[in-house]
Image: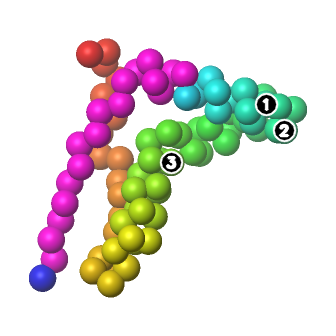
Amino acid sequence: MKTTIQLDIEISDQYLENWNKDFLNYHNELYHDSKKAEQVLKENPYEKSLASWIEDQIIDYHPKVVKSCKASIIKTDTGNK
């Protein structure tokens, strides 16, 4: 039997904006290259990082129960709420 659990997570636009700024600042200091920092952010947005963390938590803490776990970003609503 396969059971699917869906999580709807709402993340504020302000949080994402702040996270992106902090992420870029960190990687600008790390690489001293703004283009590389922007590419890293593009490849690893917060939503992808969060999905990966959720997968890791589920697999790490429920290894005998959960055989596989794949988190996906289904919808990104760019409208302000």
Choose between 3 and 43: the one closer to the eye: 3
Q: Which residue is rendered at x = 67% and y = 42% of the image?
A: 40
Mark seen at residue 49: 3
Q: What residue sits 31% from the left and 18% below the top?
A: 79
Q: Residue at x 35, y 47 (%)?
A: 73
Residue 28 - label: 1
Q: Hey, what amino acid is under mark 2?
A: Tyr
Q: Residue furthest right?
A: 32
Q: Nearer the viewer, residue 39 or 60?
A: 60
From mark 3 to mark 2, how far is it between C-alphas?
20 Å
How far, Cα to Cα, is label 2 from label 1? 5 Å
Tell me where residue 26 appears, x and y as whole percent: 73, 33
Check the image and report above or below for 71 versus 35.
below
Q: Secondary structure at mark 1?
A: helix
**Residue 17 lies in the magenta stretch:** yes
Residue 61 coordinates in the image, percent (x, y): 39, 71
| Quarter placement of the N terminus | bottom left
Asked if one can make out residue 33 in the rendered structure from this viewpoint, the answer is no
Q: Are marks 2 and 1 in contact (CB under 8 Å)?
A: yes
Above or below for 64 versus 6: below
Real-space Cα separation, disc 1 to disc 3, in angstroms: 19 Å
Classify mark 2: helix, strand or loop: helix
Residue 66 placed where, x, y %?
30, 77
- Overall secondary structure of the magenta stretch? loop
Quarter holding residue 78? top left
**Residues in magenta?**
2-18
Looking at this rendering, what residue extends furthest in the top direction?
80
- Vertical placement of 16 versus 27: above or below? above
